[in-house]
Amino acid sequence: MKKVAILISGSGSNMVTLAQSMTGDHPARPCVVLSNRPDAGGLEKARALGIETVVVDHKDYKGDRDAFDAAVIAALDPYSPDIIALAGFMRILTPDFITHYAGKMLNIHPSLLPKYKGLHTHQRAIDAGDRQAGCSVHEVTAELDGGPILAQGRVDILPDDTADDLAARVLPLEHKIYPETLLRFAKGDRSRVDI
Ligand code: GAR
């Protein structure tokens, strides 16, 4: 059975869908949910699902990314995770961290990568006059939001859409493609599936 560490910063809705998918004959189970924010709403949801939680507060490291990432590694390694799933984890990870877990990391990003890496993805898609927006699950490499794409989901952008409207329509797609991709990844399948 593969062990999955899920990293969050916020409400943790993707974490919940990932955790709830790992039942029955699924080849993986969640081993820990780690948050960089002590007030992340997802922590309580993880505990309610019976998953161990850990907080490594980035504010304790005063901008020292190397020290923060070393603390995250020190918190995760006792669980011997086979897969690290970033689920709304809003910290940029250092190359050392990514090397440590090379080939084991997934992320969900709310854009049709390679468009709109980074923040404010939905507003940028609207401002650019795009007809579609969406979300991508990708492997994590040293290039921010730049690793191989394993899945994408897309929605039409409607004439009066705000970024919040778009986020509300894309989030259910995230909840569909992330568990599906995690299942394939846990089985060693790194092909790309778009819906
Ligand atoms: C999701 O929309 C996810 O795609 C995004 O944060 C949200 C987290 O929601 N991630 C990023 O922007 C990563 N750069 P959740 O906490 O409810 O899963």
Image (tube, rainbow, N blue to C red):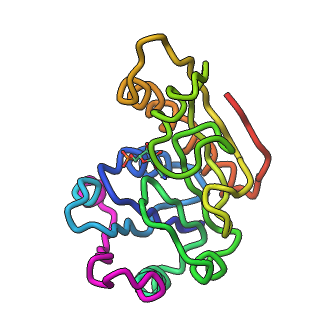
Task: Name the outermost residue toward the top.
Answer: 159
**Which residue sits at x=62%, y=75%?**
98
**Magenta stretch holds residue 39:** no
From this view, report whether residue 21 is shown above or below residue 97: above
From this view, report whether residue 135 is shown above or below residue 60: above
At which x and y percent is residue 43?
Answer: 26, 60
At which x and y percent is residue 51?
Answer: 33, 63
**Magenta stretch holds residue 61:** yes
**Which residue sits at x=67%, y=64%?**
143
From this view, report whether residue 128 is shown above or below residue 181: above
Give 4 or 123, whichever is nearer the viewer: 123
Total marks in image:
0
Res 146 → quadrant: bottom right
Give 142 or 7, whichever is nearer the viewer: 142
At which x and y percent is residue 180?
Answer: 61, 41
Res 131 → quadrant: top right
**Which residue sits at x=29%, y=60%?**
50
At which x and y percent is residue 182?
Answer: 60, 51
71 left or right of 105 in image: left
On-image quarter of the C terminus: top right
On-image quarter of the N terminus: bottom right
Magenta segment: 45-67
123 left or right of 28 in image: left
